[in-house]
Image (spheres, helix red, strand yellow):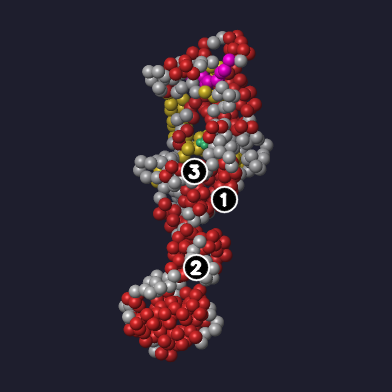
Amino acid sequence: MKKVRTRFAPSPTGFMHLGGMRTALYAYIYAKARGGDFILRIEDTDRERYVDGAVEVIYQTLKDGGLIYDEGPDVGGSFGPYVQSERMEIYKKYAELLVEKGGAYYCFCDKARLEELKKDDENAKYDKHCLNLSKEEVEMRIKRGDSYVIRQNIPEHGVGTYTDLVFGEISVDYSDLDDNVLIKSDGMPTYNFANVVDDHLMEISHVIRGVEYLSSTPKYNLMYDAFGWERPEYIHLPVIMKDATRKLSKRYGDANFDDFIAKGFTAPAIMNYIALLGWCPKDNVEKMNLDDMIEKFSLDGVSKSPSIFDETKLRWLNGEYLKAMDDEEFFALAKPFFEKSKVYGKFDIKKLAKLLKSRVEILSEIPEKIDWLAEFNSYDKELFFNKKNKTNSEVAISLLPEIIESVKGISDFTNATLFEKLSEKATALGVKTGAFFWVMRIAITGQAVTPGGATEMAEILQKEETLRRLQFSLDMLKNS
Ligand code: GLU
């Protein structure tokens, strides 16, 4: 059986669209599930759209997402070059061959004539005027240096049909297709031509790409047929929408992979989430790493209808990934966000990270979740009220001196020791530990919700600050 080879063929636009990343992901897992190769090809023939550094963004984003390509511009391979602008000679040769085979023709029409054709109807097709030029005339004009393009020769009648592995049978009337330009006057190929030549020469078995190419594929098939090449299999993927009417787009600031990383999403969670945009695993277990996806992916689970990007779900999934990390891994990722917080330089952020790991969905929430810790001020004494623990500000006034006294006597300021010693003290006083710790936690944080219990928070604050806060709270209550 033919080896499965898939490719991801982005244009270097300077950022990686999540939709593009999903295409890359599906191409990767499809190949890997079948012992095949995954290839990266850079489609940079549109020089006007060229952006400096954009190719590096592609390499880096694929690596961040874990999509290790077997062949590509920076890793090599035996089907290179993998950058289209380095394949000009190849396109020239095959364009000439296609002309010889009748699948394309030279066209010398100037701008004025082309505009004239579209004067009454801007969608008017090219009228095949140059198809009738004799071979001698074409040769003479090329020799003379006339500017020309090469156009595809689409049959005037008939229907192009193929079976897409997701969308099923697709038929397009040739009369609806235009004789598109394959080679531009500057010698550059268009996407329409280059994708066919490259996919064939790179022995791509399955072309996986966005649904926007579904109805132009019959044009490409005409070229495969004219060359006498075997057509690849096609897998077109549904569009990703922002909501019912808008596509996910860079314009709304919601499509760039790196923007999500900057917001504090992790690459594995993003990859997991985008895998679910258009595909549902049979077992409905949604949390999957790349290996799970390779094992579970199947085309019958891929949907034809558009999928809607749900950031709330991505946040939830990201939180699951953060929770599952070990403390070191979480801290390594979260450190830059802790450094942006007001607690940085005041308290041990590594200890705080342990407490926060299971309490954040995205890393950028970290500063807002802990900034308050650095700004201890008067707070609402009603916070001491707790029905279950039977506490209120009066109870706090009576317990705080005991807490202060105990804390003064503890030198090993760790959660474990604090918890043990303070529990003993509460028991000795005949006070429920729940009440004791409720009062202490409010008194040292001034917050209803904190990422840890009283003794965990005390360990973060350390002895001096813990005592200062306990005293502050006692004074505040007494003076109110
Ligand atoms: N360069 C094309 C794009 O970025 C690739 C489409 C394809 O995969 O064939 O849309």
Question: Which segment did they paint magenta?
Answer: 146-155
The crowd level at tag 1 (other Cα within 10 Å; few <14, some 14-19, many 20+) is some
- Residue behind mark 1: 64
Measuring from the top left, give residue 450's x and y in whole percent: 42, 70
Q: Earlier in the sequence, mark 2 or mark 1?
A: 1
Count of number-bearing discs: 3
Does the magenta run of residues contain 150?
yes
Marks 1 and 3, how far apart at CA? 14 Å
Q: Is mark 1 within 8 Å of ligand 1?
A: no
Query: Can see residue 35?
Result: no
Name the amino acid, label 1. Asp
Q: Secondary structure at mark 1?
A: helix
Marks 2 and 3 sit apart, C-alpha to C-alpha, by 35 Å
Instruction: Residue at 55%, 82% (x, y): give it.
Output: 412
- Indicate the position of residue 4 as horizontal and vertical percent values: 59, 39
| Marker disc for residue 273 | none
Q: Is residue 72 visible?
A: yes
Quarter of the image holding residue 99?
Answer: top right
Camera-nearest residue between 44 and 169: 44
Q: Residue furthest front?
A: 479
Mark 2 belongs to which amino acid? Val
Q: Which residue is mark 2?
A: 343
Q: Is residue 224 above or below residue 386?
A: above
In this picture, is 69 found above or below 407? above
Residue identified by numbered label 3: 17
